[in-house]
Amino acid sequence: MKKIIYLSLAVIASLQAEELLEDISVIEKATTQVVKNISGEELKSADLADALQKNVSSISLIRRSGIANDIILRGQKRDNINVTIDGAKIYGACVNRMDPPTSHVVTHAISDVVVQEGPFDVEEFGVLSGSVKIKTKKPSKELHGDLSLNGGSFGYKKASGTISGGTDKVRVLFSASNETGEQYLDGNGNNFAEQLENYTASTKSPKDDPFVYAPNNRNMDAFEKTMYMGKVFVNFTPDQELQLSYTANRSDNVLYPSSKMDALYDDSDILNVKYAIKNLSSYSKKLDLQLYNSKVEHPMSTKYRKAGQTKYMTHALTTEMTGLKVKNRVDAFGQNIVYGVDGSQRNWNGQYNMTNVGTGVVTNMRKSIDDVNTKNVGLFLKSKQSIGEVDIEMGARYDDTSIETASKTNKNKSYNALSANVVANYNLNNNTKYFVGLGKSSRVPDARELYNTKTDGTLNGNPNLNQTTNYELDLGLEKSFDAGTIKLKSFYSKLKDYIYYNGNPAVTQNNFENIDATIYGAELSGSYMPTDEIYLSAGLAYKKGQKDTQTTGQTGTNLAEITPLKLNLTAEYDYDENGMVEVSLIASDRWSNIDAENGEQTLAGYGIVNLKTSRNFDNGLEFTLGVDNAFDKTYTTTNTYKDLILMTDGGNTMLMNEPGRYVYLNAKYGF
């Protein structure tokens, strides 16, 4: 029976399957993948980025610390990926990407994550390479709850819990967690401080030494993170529902050894209000209104380094996002039609300060980002219909964006763009499906790319940047068999005015430039169930990126951040109804197609084996024992593209090794 359920879901590949089965890892639909049961399977870490790169072959990890890591999707990162949490958009405040959007939610609060690749999401502003839609747990009417205690190598400890319940009219959920972790050890047995010291010793550069950790901070914890989430759902009538939610994330003393600064704290707050009315009239099958506000406060500092023992610099940054969306669904002209308006404003502000340790006096130095507001209004329309064996989805969006800065030396900017796409699925028969997608989308420069100023007053932003436009073609085939499925998809992306960082030493300011570029690739995935107890899945992703035009003073044609061939392979054995064991492999080819002129280094290939077993008991207890990097390999996934400010002597840049062997045990009680 379980085999039938697995294969039915794989064939259907429908987003409606999200509520059906908790132990499916990934469900695919054309350019969309749904990563399921994050909270159940990834309890050992708050880091969503780490969980995604283990489950989605097209996603790679940018390692900066023990938590709060970033992702690359189809060779692009930063604002080229649109991230929302329950429909609310949140940005990080750090110009050096220490607090990416995925870091402002913890895995135990997540129900599933929808990864949509390509420029096919017209409901959101600025979707270029794809979107990551994070959905957190919903409150239930019945009384449900869980309590989890987790521990692992490198001093990792976590306690989390969720309780939910209510009536037909009102449902409530509250969730909380706290976790701490020491500096992890890489495969060579070196912690963060030792990795940094080994790098500075190898450079023999006196200017690097002040940025190693001070003796009293060499063994400090790598992070502490606390999260609170509350939700109230009110059903006024069977057709009207109000959803209120608030999430608070508090991270303290997060170490970033490959940078010159660490985060003193990273605080975020997300307030989200949704109101839905069904069957309002013949012109409205469902009307949705959403208002949200997200704030992030992020001071990063040299306080924990040798350079910060008498006085330390702090780069204090804040960002706030407010958004309103109204959309209406209607069945008309034989189609399911959704249309609406989407508006938002993002503020970003940054200030350099110097603190005298002896006196505690804080001196303001200069602005890094001077109170920049990015205001956007977008109109969108999308439709879905079936014509015989062909399912067609179409979408269009028009954006009007203005960017205003308080700086008296930089000019304001304005942009407008029309985005559109069409995706057609041809169902040849019950077992074979083809799809083709054609899309265009744009995203505007952010305040860092336009206006960011270094500590010495040099402008490394570029106020003359154009918005980036992606023209993309996607093709794919899906085939199901009696005991499995296989899916092949490919993409070809032409990027006009791609925003790119030029690290040429001769370019002392306006480091961000517009170039034209091409990224293309293919992904092969499949699943197979030889028996009812054994489930096999695999994903293989390859991509290639080329510069079509050149950055100033450079000649190389390889794009940065184009990760090499990557394989995700998993075998699961359910030895009875309550227990399973799993073996997974994550492997990558040698990273040799690099942009050396902009700081990238050749990285060795790797293959990592992860092991896991879990056992459920009738009394509500569940235990999970796992080992990541079982053979204690030393390896690196993250390259050193100069758009991040990393430890460098001008020639060699510090590489950050991944964790060595990590053993963890999770105990969960649910009722």
Image (cartoon, grey):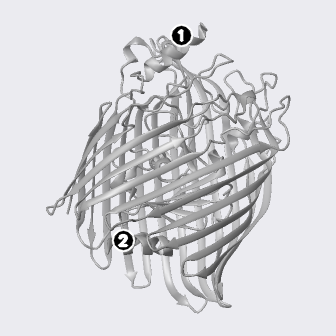
Q: CA distance from mark 1 to mark 2?
A: 56 Å
Mark sitting on residue 3: 2
Q: Is residue 489 above or below residue 364?
A: below
Q: Position of residue 96 (x, y in %)?
A: 60, 34
Residue at label 1? 201
Q: Nearer the viewer, residue 141 or 431?
A: 431
Is mark 1 in CB contact (under 8 Å) with mark 2? no
Q: Position of residue 133 (x, y in %)?
A: 53, 60
Residue 406 placement, left or right of 557: left
Q: Position of residue 434 (x, y in %)?
A: 64, 73
Residue 64 placement, left or right of 653: left
For the residue labelled by badge 1, is the local secondary structure a helix, a strand or a loop? helix
- Which amino acid does the dot numbered 2 rest on? Lys
Q: Residue at x 66, y 42 (%)?
A: 562
Q: Which quadrant holds the C terminus? A: bottom left
For the residue labelled by badge 2, is the local secondary structure a helix, a strand or a loop? helix
